[in-house]
Structure formats: C-alpha cells, structure tokens
Amino acid sequence: MLIYNTTYHVGLDDARNFVIWLNECYIPEAEKGGELTNPRILRILSHQEPDSECFSLQFEVTDSSALHRWHTRSGASLNEEMMKIFKDKVIGFPTLMEVIK
C-alpha cells in the first residue's frame, strides 16, 4: 500500500476556498477512476506562517503504476484546472510514501 501525498502552501485569503474546492471538485474527480481511495485533508501545524496555511491531501493507491495511470488519465488535467483557478496562490509538491506497518 502506498500513500500519495501532496502538500499545499496556500495564501491565507484563499485557504478556505481552496479546501472547499478540494472537497467539492478535486477529490470527487480524483476518485472516479478507482486508483485513488480513502482521501483525507490535513492541516499542517508545524509550518505555520501568518499569511498562509499548509495542507496535506492524501490518498491510498495500490502501486506506482496505478498512480501513473491516474496521473495520465485525470491527475494532470486536475492540476491544470487548479492552476487556472488559484494561479500562483497555491503551491504544491507531491510525495509518494510506502506504508510499512
């Protein structure tokens, strides 16, 4: 089992709308193909700055080939949509992690 995590740095003025967009648009679209499951959004508390918030969006995925399939089919277009909506107000970086226990 793998965890596909994306950490987002979001301007404070856009944080609420970003989380709403993740819940209402991004997550439902990301789950459609069946490769990504069990989504969760977490607020990162260890790197707080006065003008921004950080979030972690995590999904479970069976293996890296399933993740690649998802990224090719819908992940890239979802990221493009996010960039159209939020422009430079959201910065994200992905991490693929393996569950050990």
Image: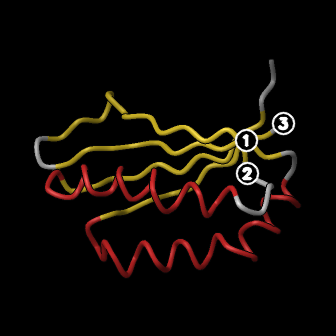
45 lies above or below 74: above
Residue depicted at 32% across the width and 57% down the height:
18
Q: Quadrant of the N terminus?
A: top right
- Mark 2 or mark 1, earlier in chain: 2
Residue depicted at 78% across the width and 59% down the height:
67
- Mark 2 or mark 3, earlier in chain: 3
Image marks 2 and 1: residues in contact by CB distance under 8 Å: yes
Residue 12 % position (x, y): 17, 51
State left or right for residue 62 relative to residue 98.
Answer: right
Residue 58 % position (x, y): 59, 42
Q: Residue 84's image quarter?
A: bottom left
State the count of labels: 3
Residue 94 % position (x, y): 57, 55
Q: Amino acid at mark 2?
A: Leu
Residue depicted at 72% across the width and 44% down the height:
37
- Mark 1 or mark 3, earlier in chain: 3
Dot label at residue 89: none
Q: Which residue is mark 2?
A: 36
Question: Which mark's residue is nearer the viewer, 2 or 3?
Answer: 2
Image marks 1 and 3: residues in contact by CB distance under 8 Å: yes
Residue 95 % position (x, y): 62, 49
Q: Residue 53's image quarter?
A: top left
54 lies above or below 72: above
57 lies above or below 98: below
Q: Which residue is mark 1?
A: 60
Dot label at residue 1: 3
Question: How are the residues colored?
Answer: secondary structure
Q: Secondary structure at mark 1?
A: strand
